[in-house]
């Protein structure tokens, strides 16, 4: 039968190179405007036309908020032990590997020392691209270690949440990270160490229902979706369409759940200003 | 009573019915069936043992959710005297999905806090199927702070599908309410004993689950997500709930192995709902023992130990 098989022709190197505008231009998910990529980047990854805040990686977040080259990551090598040996249609370990391939990180959070406008702080930043920013043992452990470092050094702790919630694949161990991180916030609180929580798009489930809603000051990015239960779950439960703007940052502000909504370009100044208010000057 | 039985209990039910029939025949016809009866009863015992000692995680989940499973108010009346139910969060309302109050356990005051499911449709609608709103968690916290103030130990009962996912719940800060409880319970300066008595549904369960000693009933379950939801998210079909229940390691025995719970309390054969008195007595005995130990520990040390306990879970 071999004579039926045609050998697949490999395209020549020159043919592979299709000239495309892809890579130079980006489409805004909100207003669907086509915008020059560099312009978005210059604008803190915010659409210059409609002010839509793009989802960004942890590295981009740090670049926007921290002083240049000031971030020193801690505990970068922590890897999940797969505590319940989880597998669904795929192995949890494979999903972890895929997350690493996609993001270059071993888990969904970066945590470390940084400076904001010269002020030393501890930053913890979620990366939604790694398994939906879900919180399992590694994320929980990194947050708590970061908070413990903040505690001993009397440095403010600042977190940027972007997470679907607790990580299913670590079962009850993930759930317990909610208690673990919230208890660590309590220890910060008793020691008078400031904790500023920034909620970005999207923040849900076990992250909303633990440390992220416990900041001394809670900031949200414009239009970020924030809630406990996901909109689809709520819709299925109540069998109604959800009101316009439900679970957006503006909705939370209106209901008294966050202190302020801060545009990305103003975030660094606001954080620095607040840290100084709490008496953590240089 | 037939609706009391779950699918996997059908063979037991059939045999029970057969014995019953035989009994009736013997009284009506006056025939001697004692030999036959003895044989069937022996078979029934064996069958029960087989079925209930080899329950799958999914079957345990069904038992944990059994409509007739004793709830917090049953336990209060089975184990305690002089109960005063306390109502309201002083901010918004009173959530019937959470019961709080003061009672006496062998004469000593205790604060009780727990989810309350209904035993039938009417009760379930009234209690919102045991799914609390933020005001429920805030009521729970209010009573726990009250207990701290008067140095009364707290006993919590976990039995919920989860915190209620609704518009009002989000508007009033479901996430914040749960988070605040985790924060405050971690440092509560009075003994806290947690009893996972039925279904431990995620954050909505944990919100009253931070304690010094965590007990779980033999057939109770506790999980980050329900097997049904897990199945539809990860397998993309709802029919894999049995597999999800196994994968999530949510049974009492799994949780003990993972170090999340301290002690498993045996249930009567067939589950807690088969014998309320026996279950109440077992739980009471365990609670008295645990409380006696916890009462001896100074509050500061108690808090330090509690913080350490949760600090260690999932430490890499």
Image (cartoon, rainbow, N blue to C red):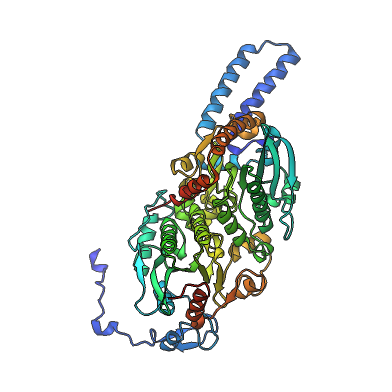
Q: Is residue B18 above or below residue A282?
A: above
Left or right: residue B62 versus residue B250 is right
Q: Residue at x 26, y 71 (%)?
A: A6
Residue B263 in the image: state x and y as whole percent. 51, 37
Q: Residue at x 47, y 79 (%)?
A: A268
- Residue B3 in view in this figure: no
Q: Residue at x 41, y 77 (%)?
A: A60
Q: Is residue B299 above or below residue A220?
A: above
Residue B316 in the image: state x and y as whole percent. 37, 53
- Residue A82 in view in this figure: yes
The front one of B13 and B199 is: B199
Please state, as top left, top right, bottom left or bottom right, where the C terminus of chain A lies in the image. bottom left
Q: Residue at x 29, y 84 (%)?
A: A17
Q: Give the quarter of the image for residue A74.
A: bottom left
Residue B241 in the image: state x and y as whole percent. 53, 49
Q: Is residue B85 above or below residue B48?
A: below
The front one of A84 and B184 is: B184
Residue A202 in the image: state x and y as whole percent. 53, 69
Please state, as top left, top right, bottom left or bottom right, where the N terminus of chain A lies in the image. bottom left
Q: Give the quarter of the image for residue B217.
A: top right
The front one of B232 and A35 is: A35
């Amino acid at each position: 039968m071999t004579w039926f098989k045609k050998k697949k022709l490999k395209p020549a190197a020159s043919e592979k190179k299709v000239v495309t505008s892809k890579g130079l231009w980006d489409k805004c998910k909100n207003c669907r405007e086509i915008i020059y990529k560099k312009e978005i980047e210059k604008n803190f990854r915010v659409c210059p036309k409609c002010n839509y805040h793009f989802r960004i990686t942890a590295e981009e977040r740090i670049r926007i908020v921290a002083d240049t080259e000031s971030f020193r990551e801690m505990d970068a090598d922590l890897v999940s032990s797969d505590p319940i040996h989880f597998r669904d249609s795929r192995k949890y370990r494979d999903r972890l590997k895929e997350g690493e391939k996609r993001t270059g990180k071993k888990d969904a959070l970066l945590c470390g020392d940084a400076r904001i406008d010269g002020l030393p702080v501890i930053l913890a930043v979620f990366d939604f691209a790694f398994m939906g920013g879900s919180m399992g043992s590694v994320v929980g452990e990194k947050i708590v270690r970061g908070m413990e470092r903040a505690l001993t050094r009397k440095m403010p702790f600042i977190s940027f949440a972007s997470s679907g919630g607790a990580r299913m694949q670590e079962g009850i161990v993930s759930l317990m990270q909610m208690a673990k991180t919230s208890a660590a916030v309590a220890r910060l609180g008793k020691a008078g160490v400031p904790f500023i929580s920034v909620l970005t798009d999207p923040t849900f489930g076990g992250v909303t229902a633990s440390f992220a809603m416990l900041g001394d000051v809670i900031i949200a990015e414009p239009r970020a979706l924030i809630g406990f239960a996901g909109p689809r779950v709520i819709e299925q439960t109540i069998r109604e369409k959800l009101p316009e703007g439900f679970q957006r940052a503006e909705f939370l502000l209106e209901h008294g759940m966050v202190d302020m909504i801060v545009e990305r370009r103003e975030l660094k100044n606001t954080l620095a200003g607040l840290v100084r208010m709490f008496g953590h000057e240089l | 009573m037939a609706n009391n039985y779950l699918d996997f209990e059908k063979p037991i039910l059939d045999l029970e019915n057969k014995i019953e029939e035989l009994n009736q025949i013997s009284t009506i016809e006056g025939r001697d069936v004692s030999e036959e009866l003895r044989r069937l009863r022996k078979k029934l015992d064996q069958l029960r043992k087989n079925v209930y000692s080899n329950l799958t995680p999914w079957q345990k989940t069904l038992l944990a959710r059994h409509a007739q499973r004793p709830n917090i108010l049953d336990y209060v009346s089975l184990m305690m005297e002089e109960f005063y139910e306390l109502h309201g969060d002083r901010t918004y309302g009173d959530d019937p999905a959470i019961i709080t109050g003061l009672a006496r356990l062998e004469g000593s005051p205790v604060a009780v806090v727990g989810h309350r499911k209904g035993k039938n449709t009417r009760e379930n609608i009234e209690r919102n199927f045991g799914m609390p709103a933020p005001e429920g968690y805030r009521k729970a916290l209010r009573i726990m702070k009250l207990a701290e103030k008067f140095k009364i130990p707290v006993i919590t009962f976990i039995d919920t599908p989860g915190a209620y996912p609704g518009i009002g719940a989000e508007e009033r800060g479901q996430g914040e309410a749960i988070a605040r409880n985790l924060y405050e319970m971690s440092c509560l300066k009075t003994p806290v004993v947690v009893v996972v008595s039925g279904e431990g549904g995620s954050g909505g369960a944990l919100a009253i689950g931070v304690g010094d000693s965590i007990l779980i009933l033999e057939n109770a379950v506790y999980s980050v997500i329900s097997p049904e939801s897990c199945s539809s998210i990860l397998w993309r079909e709802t029919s894999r709930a049995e597999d999800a229940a196994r994968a999530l390691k949510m049974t009492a025995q799994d949780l003990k192995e993972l170090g999340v719970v301290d002690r498993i309390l045996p249930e009567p054969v067939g589950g807690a709902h088969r014998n309320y008195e026996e279950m109440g007595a077992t739980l009471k005995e365990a609670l008295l023992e645990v409380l006696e130990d916890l009462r001896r520990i100074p509050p500061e040390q108690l808090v330090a130990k509690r913080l350490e306990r949760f600090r260690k879970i999932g430490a890499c």
